[in-house]
Amino acid sequence: MYKYLCLLQIFLSLLLVSLAYADFDEAVTAYETGDYAKAYKEFKALADQGNGPAQLRLAVMYDLGQGVQQNQTEAIKWYVKAAEQGLARAELALGMKYAGAIGIPQDYSQAVKWYTRAAEHGVPEAQSDLGLMYSQGKGVTQDKAEAVKWYRKAAEQGYDMAQCNLGLMYAKGEGVPQDYTEAVKWFLKAAGQGYVNAQHNLGVAYEKGDGVPKDLVSAYMWFSLAAARGDSDAKSRIEILARQMTPPQIVEAQRMIGDWRPTEPDSQSLFFTPPRYP
């Protein structure tokens, strides 16, 4: 009889888990089709039962005001619950909240704490932001070498911001020996994904001949791509370059601009991404 009851308890537990997964899938489908009211209802019920992924989704809905009135306090509450279960994207979200004073007092030490947890779980955005904290000495003792370490981890996952920042570290010789060739390598990876700062930096590299042969045509192209994405300084640099270039060179640069297409990232995160803040 005891054995039978144990088996029944196991069966019922597995049944509840399968039902929870089914409800979660239904909630995700509702969310992805824009039925936020239904998604909120399903996620809330699961979150109240301690379902970590549902807690994360619910936090995002409070964060963005989807299916419920926007409420940063509630968002943070649910991010904390999800993060305490080890959900890396919830950890990242808390890092961003503390760093950016979004719905909570700014606290760089807390930001570093949550960024570190998410970074150690392999989240590239957290690795990149943690690198920035070490680079600027916010919430931690400034350590350029440690910044490079975290930038590199994120950059090797294809995260464009980290690739650009790693390139800057090489260009400036911060945390690593100065190496313009290595800087250009990382700028190219980020610029290829359309990251405007990297496109600007490549324009500078080609204009000066840092890490690449001096090439005004390529400099004009990269500055133009950056300018098209709102880089006002790149616009003024284009005007300066144009006065140094021949008409055929400008035509060639414009052809290159027309032919350029962004590349796919080297890798993509498999995690659900919470909203990103500037």
Image: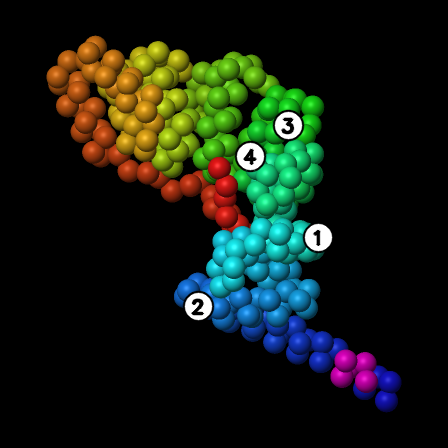
Residue 173 on image: x %, y %: 54, 15
Tell me which numbered mark, 4 or 3, is placed earlier along the sequence.
4
Residue 147 on image: x %, y %: 60, 26
- Circle 4 or circle 3, nearest the eye: 3
User: What amino acid does circle 3 point to?
Assistant: Lys
Please name the residue that numbered disc 3 is placed on: 138
Badge 4 marks a residue whose secondary structure is: helix
- Circle 1 or circle 4, nearest the eye: 1
The residue lying furthest to the right in this view is 2
Compared with 118, 61 (above or below) is below
User: What amino acid does circle 2 point to?
Assistant: Asp
Residue 268 on image: x %, y %: 47, 46
State the image quarter where residue 199 is shown.
Answer: top left
Residue 22 on image: x %, y %: 56, 73
Q: Is the Cβ of the residue at disc 4 closer than 8 Å to that at disc 2?
A: no
Q: In the rendered view, does 7 fall on the left or right side of 142? A: right
Please name the residue that numbered disc 1 is placed on: 84
User: What amino acid does circle 1 point to?
Assistant: Glu
Badge 3 marks a residue whose secondary structure is: loop
Q: Residues within 10 Å of mark 2 (few under 14, many from 20)?
A: some
Tell me which numbered mark, 1 or 2, is placed earlier along the sequence.
2
Please name the residue that numbered disc 2 is placed on: 35
